[in-house]
Image (cartoon, grey):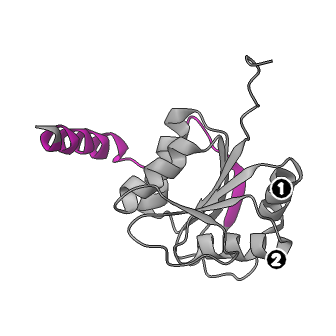
Amino acid sequence: MSGDKKPRAKKLLLMGSSAYKAKELPNELRERIDAAVAQGYTIIVGEAYGACRAFQDYLASKGYRDVVVGHAVRLRYNAGNWKDFQYGKNLKERERGMIEDCDSAVIIWVNSSGVIAENLELLKRLGKPTFVYEYDSRTGAERTGELDPERQYDPYYFVKEHYRKLKHKQTQL
């Protein structure tokens, strides 16, 4: 039938702090990625140092092919020679574009990184199911769980959004 539409593939975003130094991903994250792979999700992953490279290396070790590497100006890392897509012209645009494109996310948040905190707020506001692995390298404390809709991840989120919208308005004039 011409009216039938092919169901859209689910998209899982893998994103995290550049301060993530471990070579292995925690078990909880590997299990979530493995489940997404088993269900045929398209995986969107960044190409920055730290968490994104750990995610890419894990996916490459699995031989998974349905991966899109998101970048801004230029592609810095692509462990599996996957498709790549320019989500913006700078870090903020790239991350926002990747978040808007996904259906759900797995995030590594190290040392309360402000960039990741802002991304967590955006994921929360967009209502995207998100699993967070939070790690403090100073204390070794780790915490995992679903994004908490009641928690404030970035106390400056609304101020940043206000100025982002003002700047966008000015560039449109």
> Mark 1 falls on what kind of element?
helix
Per the image, the residue denoted by label 1 is 37
- Going 77% across and 49% down the picture, which residue do you hit? 41
98 lies left or right of 167: right
Asked if residue 68 can be seen in this view, the reply is yes
> Residue most toward the right?
38
Nearer to the camera, 110 or 73 = 73
- Going 67% across and 39% down the picture, which residue do you hit? 129
Q: Amino acid at mark 1?
A: Val
Write down the region rendered in magenta. 142-171
Q: Quadrant of the N terminus?
A: top right
Nearer to the camera, 106 or 85 = 85
- Coordinates of residue 20 in the picture (x, y in percent): 59, 76
Give above or below for 116 relative to 54: above
- Going 74% across and 25% down the picture, which residue do you hit? 5
For the image, the number of numbered tags is 2
Q: CA distance from mark 1 to mark 2?
A: 13 Å
Per the image, the residue denoted by label 2 is 61
